[in-house]
Amino acid sequence: MHLVGRSIDFHRAQMDRNNVRWGGGVGPTDKGYPKPADVSKVLGTRYFFTLGQQEFTDVFFTSGARGLVDPNSSAFARMFSVADRMLESREAYGFGELHIDNSKSFSTMQFARKIEFDNPVVQRIYALADKYQGVIQFHMQGDPANVASLRKKLLEFPNSKTVLSHGLPWSSQPLLRELLEAHPNLYIELSRKGATLNDREAAQAFSKSTGPKENWLKTIEQFPDRFMIGSDTHAPDEERYDAVMQEFREGLLPYLKPETLKNVAYQNAIRVFRLNPDPK
Ligand SMILES: [Zn+2]
């Protein structure tokens, strides 16, 4: 659940209307509104904040892709100075959504970039996530060099938990299955895999009208404790939140085995992000 300039009441009403209990996993963008601490005041533990989205956006628009691999970029330096305290106190649940490579899966052209996954910023984030069993959510694509670097980090930091946004765009089912098989600390998030926010038929995993594609259904059932749903609605898609949730409910969840359905709908997220299972 992105926070991009809408009021906290807007987000709460959106969640309530759709019977969605938890939202988060990404922070606000560079404008920093609404502020995560204020969102927590209203939503309590229904909201789970993660560090880094605001900082990645800030650094990218100040110093470009080069700044994103420099831990001394000023926004990163500020983030690293508070990260230990926030992860320890659970004010932050980890890091995300961090855009490594959205060169072919960007929301707006000026937000597109591709950096090397193996860099000192990512290294430091993994060390922190490993220390506090935190989650790191990446937006990256199935680029062979970056996927090879990801594998190394998953092995080097076994206590960290990595979530790949949007089902790892520009990859394949054999690759996803191979990654999930080899790395128990890897998870897949399914926002923008329905037709509602994804115009490219070949990139869709399911749709309201046709249900899930067979290869996706097979992968999810093969790894029922590794997939999660997400909204990803942000400007200009914010008003499509209801349609996105409806599409999960009609185009994906009913096709899953009952236990898999519960896992993908919320139980995996509770376990992986260590969410309050019964927030107010
Ligand atoms: Zn994304």
Image: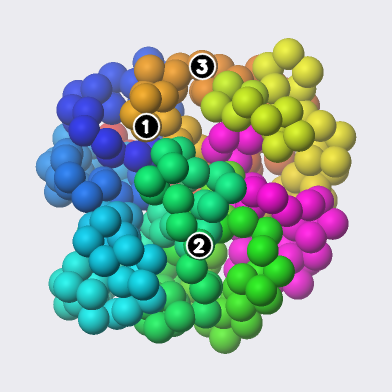
The residue that mark 1 highlights is: 234
Q: Residue at x 26, y 56 (%)?
A: 61
Mark 2 highlights which residue? 114
What residue is disc 3 on?
243
Answer few, some or many: residues within 10 Å of disc 1's Cα (few below 14, many 20 plus, some between 14 and 19).
some
Q: Is residue 251 magenta?
A: no
For label 3, count other residues whose C-alpha is less than 10 Å away and answer few (under 14), some (14-19) or many (20+). some
Task: Please name the amino acid that badge 2 sits on.
Answer: Lys
- Magenta segment: 167-194
Answer yes or no: is residue 122 visible: yes
Give the x, y percent position of residue 159: 51, 77
Q: Which mark is residue 62?
A: none
Q: Quadrant of residue 205?
A: top right
Give, as a three-letter code, the residue at label 1.
His
Measured in 3D between alpha carbons, the distance from the residue under mark 3 to the one under mark 1, in whole angstroms, is 13 Å
Q: Is residue 172 magenta?
A: yes
Of the two numbered discs 1 and 2 on the same chain, state the one appearing first in sequence. 2
Cα gap from disc 3 to disc 2, whole angstroms: 30 Å
Residues at marks 1 and 2 touching, judged by CB atoms closer than 8 Å: no
Looking at the image, which is closer to me, 2 or 130?
2
Question: What residue do we see at 44% from left, 19% from top?
Answer: 240
Tell which of 221 and 83 is nearer to you.
83
